[in-house]
């Protein structure tokens, strides 16, 4: 069956005006003014009226703890697995799963199984191999082979540096891992990125820069995240981008409670004012990850849990509070992460792209979600939930 979205104000993410969108199976096959409904005797079509609404690409969250995370305060502080409905209500049609601190009770094979289960339930999923830990925990025995042989593995991450929870890898260990990831990406025609968890220490960027200067690995092979953790790291991030690097801002973070200017929505405005191009930035949620609140002696005082719903909320803050152009803000969670991850069949509303689409109200509320051509939520009502929800 075809789907025809009528009278849509389309942000591709760039605004392209009022158009109709025709979908066949999971692909956009036409975008034009006044597309006619096919003859029902030839082919049935489901009509979706988007009059007065905005249609945008499905969101890509490049950092989600699909099987939970945490545990830094003991076993009772391990965070839960994510549910399909949470992702759908957040407008996320592509999620990339990772393991954080705990690669002892959290396993890559479990992460892979969870990703496949979510895909069976209706969204698109990928994973990173590895975790905070060195030597890397992998599925096949090394990260290069994981990237080459396992379709869902896009790169390595989140590898922790400049953090007391890191395994404190040497430059040589990190360099070899990055080289393996790059070669794996080349041979598999994937991103092969190294997704780097940036801790409190500013030496993190220097650590990466030293490796770049000592090898021929391009700076864009690395994607540092949590760069809005503190002001010093944010300033170092500006210098990193000036070297042609790219950085990722986290939309869930308890460290931002005491300093709202570190919220992703405000941080992006600050970075743009400092001359950082929007193309060098992305948002990710750290959804279902543990957000420890640590005192100055390293003792955990409390725990929060990352929310995938924060992804679009911070985009809206950037638009509504900081007057960032909506089309630019959308790029942070659509076309930019698609390019980072080399998922070039999504992230934009174009003919031939995957039919991952959201219908928003004029107040930027998510009303309907289409993932791979399937209607997952309609007018705020979930149509599909997880198997055990």
Image: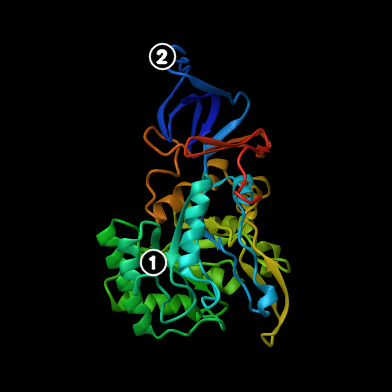
**Is residue 332 visible in the rendered structure shown here?**
no
Location of residue 75 in the rendering, given as x and y in whole percent from the top left corner: 66, 77
Name the residue: 70% across, 75% down: 76
Residue 87: image tag: none
Location of residue 241 in the rendering, given as x and y in whole percent from the top left corner: 44, 64
Most distant residue in the front direction? 388
Nearer to us of marks 2 and 1 is 2
Against 123, is 222 above or below? Answer: below
Name the residue: 43% across, 50% down: 338
**Is residue 16 visible in the rendered structure shown here?**
yes
Reading the image, the residue beneath label 1 is 243
Q: Secondary structure at mark 2?
A: loop
Location of residue 189 in the rendering, given as x and y in whole percent from the top left corner: 28, 56
Nearest to N terminus: mark 2 or mark 1: 2
Label 2: few (<14), some or many (≥20) within 10 Å? few
Reading the image, the residue beneath label 2 is 42
Q: Nearer the viewer, residue 162 or 58?
A: 58
Mark 2 touches mark 1? (CB < 8 Å) = no
Label 1: few (<14), some or many (≥20) within 10 Å? few
Q: Nearer the viewer, residue 353 or 80?
A: 80
Q: Nearer the viewer, residue 378 or 107?
A: 107
């Amino acid at each position: 069956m075809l789907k025809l979205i009528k009278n849509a104000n389309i942000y591709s993410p760039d605004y392209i005006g009022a158009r109709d969108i025709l979908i066949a199976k999971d692909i956009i096959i036409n975008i034009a003014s006044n597309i006619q409904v096919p003859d029902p005797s030839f082919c049935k079509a489901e009509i979706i009226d988007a009059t007065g609404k905005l249609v945008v690409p499905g969101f890509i969250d490049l950092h989600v703890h699909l099987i939970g995370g945490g545990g830094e305060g003991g076993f009772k502080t391990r965070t839960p697995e994510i549910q399909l409905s949470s992702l759908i209500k957040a407008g996320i049609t592509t999620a990339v799963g990772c393991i954080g601190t705990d690669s002892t009770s959290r396993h890559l094979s479990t992460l892979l199984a969870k990703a496949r289960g979510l895909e069976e339930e209706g969204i698109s999923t990928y994973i990173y191999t590895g975790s905070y830990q060195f030597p890397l925990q992998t599925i096949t025995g090394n990260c290069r082979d994981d990237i080459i042989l396992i379709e869902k593995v896009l790169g390595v991450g989140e590898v922790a540096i400049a953090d007391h929870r890191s395994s404190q890898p040497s430059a040589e260990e990190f360099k070899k891992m990055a080289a393996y990831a790059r070669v794996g990406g080349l041979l598999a025609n994937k991103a092969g990125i190294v997704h780097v968890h940036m801790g409190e220490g500013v030496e993190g960027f220097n650590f990466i820069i030293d490796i770049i200067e000592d090898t021929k690995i391009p700076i864009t092979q690395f994607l540092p995240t949590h760069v809005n953790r503190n002001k010093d790291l944010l300033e170092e991030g500006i210098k990193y981008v000036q070297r042609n690097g790219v950085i990722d801002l986290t939309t869930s973070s308890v460290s931002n409670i005491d300093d709202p200017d570190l919220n992703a929505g405000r941080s992006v405005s600050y970075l743009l004012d400092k001359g950082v191009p929007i193309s060098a930035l992305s948002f990710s949620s750290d959804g279902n990850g543990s957000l420890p609140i640590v005192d100055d002696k390293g003792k955990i005082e409390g725990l929060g849990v990352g929310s995938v719903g924060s992804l679009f909320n911070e985009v809206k803050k950037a638009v509504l509070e900081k007057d960032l152009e909506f089309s630019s803000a959308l790029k942070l969670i659509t076309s930019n992460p698609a390019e980072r991850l080399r998922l070039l069949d999504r992230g934009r509303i174009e003919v031939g792209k995957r039919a991952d689409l959201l219908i928003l109200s004029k107040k930027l509320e998510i009303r309907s979600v289409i993932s791979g051509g399937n209607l997952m939520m309609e007018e705020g009502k979930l149509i599909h939930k997880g198997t055990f929800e």
